[in-house]
Amino acid sequence: MTLFRDNGVPFRRTLSLLLSLSLLLSLFTSAGAVKSSSEIINAMKVRSESALLVDMDTDVVLYEQSADKQIAPASITKVMTALLVLEAVEDGTLTMKETVTAQDDCWRDLDSTSSNQNIRPEEEMSVKDLLYCLLVASANEAGNVLGTRISGSIDAFVELMNERAAALGCQNTHFVNTHGMPDRKHYTTCRDLYLIAKAAMSYSQFREIVKTSEYFVKPTNLSEKRHFFNTNALLSNMKYRGYVYEPCIGIKTGTTEKGGYNLLSAAEKDGKTLISVVIGCQTKQKKDGTVEYTHFSESARLLEWGFENFSTITIVDQKQTYGEVPVTLSTDADSVTVSPERSISAELPNDITPESFEMVPSLRSSVEAPVHKGDVLGTLVLYLDGKEYGAVNLLAVNDVEASAFLKRKAMLEVLFSRWYVKAGIGLFALLILVLILRLTIFRRSRRYGSRHTGRAGGYRGRRKW
C-alpha cells in the first residue's frame, strides 16, 4: 500500500474498524490456528468437529474451531426456512394468522421415524402454529408445508433458500430440502449458519418462537390439540435433564446419525447477545451410568466462557496526542500536535490490554503552513506480538496560519532555484556584459579616430573674397 510523501512511510487510508469487530479477533483465534498471545484463547477447546462463537451485536468472532469446515446442518436448516417465511410476512405475501392447507407431498422424502408433528395432507393450520411446529418441535413436514405456500412448490422454495443464503454472504452453503434430512449435497458451515441465524434473530417473532420451552397448537380439522416441548435442552428439561442455561434465548437443534449432534444457540447476558454453533458432537457415557449430550453442555460452556472472558476496551483514545510535526512558513508556531482520527475500541480476551499493543506513530517530516485542524499528517500503526493489526490516521489538532512574508520569500526561493530561471538570469547577465563590452570598445574606437584626423590636417576650405 502506497504512501508516505516525505519519509517513505506510507500514509494509510482510514481503517476505522480494523481493531474492532471480526478482523482483529479472527486473528486471535483459535484451535488449529497460529497460537494467540491470549492464554484464554489458547486454553479453550470445544468437544466438537467445528464450533463458532460470535458477539451478534458487533460480529466479533470470540472463538472459532474449523468454522469453515463443510458440515451437515440437519434440522438447523429450519432456521433458513423460518427466515424466508418471516420475510414473506414482512413484505405482505402472507400473515402469521393465515391458514395454510398441507399439500399432498408435504411428507416428501420423509418417514414416520423422522422428527414430525404428524401434519397430514389437507390439514389446515396457521402460519404461526406451523412455525412453532417447525422450530420448537422440529417438525420436518412443517417446512415443506410452509415452503410450498410461499413458492408454490418445495423445489422452488429450496431454490429461494439457496438464493437467500448467497445474498447473506454464505460462502459454502447449499440446500436441497426445507428441513435438513441428510443428503450429500445439503451442507453449510458454522460461519454461514451464524449469518443465517443473525438475519433470523432480527425478527421479534423468530426470537419469541425459538425461546419457547413448550407450546400448544389448537385443534385442527384433522387433529386434536398438540402439545410439545422445545428440543433445545438449554431451554427445557422435558427430554434431557440438567442442561438448562438461564441466559439462553434459542435457537435450534439438529441431529443426524452420521454427523452427530448439533446446536445453534443464542444467549443474552450483561447487555451482550452471543451466538454459538457447535457441530458434530457425540454423547459421552459418564461414570454414574448417565449419558452426557455434549452439544448442550459444550454450548453452555462456550457461551458462558464468552461472557466471562471478554470485555470491550479502548486501545486508542482520540484525546491522546502522538507527537508533533514541524511546520514551516509560519511565525505562529514551529510545530503542530497530532491525535488519532477516532478512538479505537475492541472486544478482547481479558488478558489482552491496551498495554499489550505497541503503538508506532509515523509522521510527515514537516508540513507547510497553513495547517488546518483535521489535516492528515500521519498514521498510528498498532502491533501485537510483532504483527501489525491496523492503523488509524493522525490529524492536526489545531490551525497554524501562514506568514505572508515567509510565503512570498519561499516562493521566490523556489522560483530562483529552478534551472531555467537560473539559466535565464545567466543569459541576461551575459547579454548585459556583451553590451557593456561593445559600448566600451565603440567609445574607445571613436576617441582614437578623432585624434588621427587632427594630425593629418584637413580641408580648410577656400577663402572667398
Image (tube, rainbow, N blue to C red):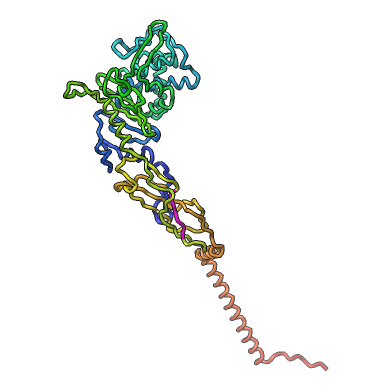
How many circles with numbers are drawn on the protein?
A: 0
Q: Is residue 329 above or below residue 63?
A: below
Answer above or below: position of 253 versus 398. Answer: above
Q: Position of residue 331 (x, y in %)?
A: 52, 64
Residue 318 vs residue 79, the one in the foreground? 318
Judged from this view, the residue extending furthest toward the right is 465
Q: Position of residue 193 (x, y in %)?
A: 35, 27
Say whether residue 16 is magenta: no
| Residue at image point 51% right, 54% down | 372
- The prevailing secondary structure element of the residues shown in magenta is strand
Residue 448 falls in image quadrant: bottom right
Magenta region: 335-340
Most extreme residue toward the top is 222
Q: Position of residue 32 (x, y in %)?
A: 25, 35
Can you see residue 373?
Answer: yes
Image quadrant containing the C terminus: bottom right
Percent across and percent down for residue 435 are 59, 75
Q: Judge from the rendering whether residue 253 lies leftward or rightward of residue 7; answer left or right.
A: left
Tell me what residue is drawn at x 32 percent, y 29 percent. 276
